Amino acid sequence: MTNSHETILHINLNTLEANFNFLKSKFPNGVKTIAVVKAFAYGLGDIEISKHLEKMGVHAFWVADFEEGVKLRKEGITKPIIVANPGYRSLKTIIKYQLEPVIFNHRLLELYANCKEKISIHLKFNTGMNRYGFETTDLQEILLILKNNPQLNIESVCSHLSSSNDPNKDDFSERQIERFKEVCKNIEDSLDINVPSHLMNSNGAMRFGSDYNEWVRLGIALYGGLGHPNLKQIFSLKSVISQIKFIKKGQSIGYQNSFIADKDMQIAIIPVGYADGLNRKLGNQNGQVFIKDKACRIIGDISMDSFIADISGVEAKEGQEVTIFSPKYSVSKLANDLDTIPYEIMATLNRRIKRIYRKSKSKK
């Protein structure tokens, strides 16, 4: 099919597969993977990413809410879909599409306990992050409810590390790990069942190798947003030069006359703006893009649908490709420059940006 778009997020499925295989090679045999595809698979496109990951053998998918789960089911995803925050009004939809809710408070537990249909659930406990999750002190009350409601099939027990990326906070992470182990043991002993558990996210799975549970949740590591040398970024954001102008020294550029040329300049207008997810902090010489591998600084304020780059001294023409970020000019470095995190840059990429997926056939 001919592509008519000029601003494109290119996604390399071969690299996604390589990242998945690398991660699997680091885990003990039998550890199952949950692919985190919430928030449109971190901006990369949940349907195509999920379909490819399902072929690669992930055990389950993790989404933020029931609507994300329903979307995957309607598109043919057959593996378990775990809903991190199912809400209180979605029970019938959860059952209809065979989604698996995470139960993290008493209100949700009561809601599902009053449902007489068999349903697979996941229990979440707060081990220190103080976000979603039962308190560990509530465990005996929870166990009593579960014993009285055998229609609730406990698929897993989970929690979340708060600082798994920070070696300076490993003591806190270790305390979370120990609390979680204790919770899991109490559940198994009290209910006389074996229940898979998962605490490790991408950073946790990479850094706490001796403490894997039966499952791990992998998101940004799959997509190569950690800056890890063996996990390659699977995506590149590219656009084109829409127009080239020549301005004189002393002329202003953009809204609020925010940039005044200190010399005669050649500038390029590029059709990507903050509505597309391009952070406004990159404006006024704080960011750069790449044309023919040459860095070109962004000048003036970033507009809703465009920005301007200084291309003085660069051999360029209208229609020329512009790289905003890529494996070579990584999103992890861009996040560092912006004093933010790669997740934010990825998840805020507007869906009006065309996504193109590439997978080369393996050589026989």
Image (cartoon, rainbow, N blue to C red):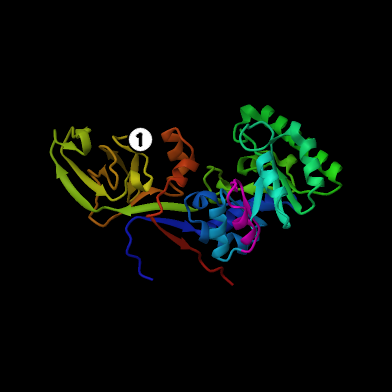
Magenta segment, which residues? 78-97
Left or right of 169 on screen, residue 240: left
Which element type, helix, strand or loop, lies under badge 1? helix
Instruction: Looking at the picture, tell me which residue is in the foreground, 131 or 18.
Output: 131
> Residue 340's x, y, as percent?
46, 35
Quadrant of the frame with the N terminus: bottom left
> Residue 54's x, y, as percent?
61, 61
93 falls in the magenta region:
yes
Above/below status of 276 relative to 130: below
**Is residue 198 at all visible to an observer of this figure?**
no
Left or right of 31 on screen, residue 277: left
Quadrant of the frame with the C terminus: bottom right
139 falls in the magenta region:
no
Instruction: Looking at the picture, tell me which residue is in the foreground, 218 or 188.
Output: 188
**Is residue 177 at all visible to an observer of this figure?**
yes
Left or right of 316 on screen, residue 158: right
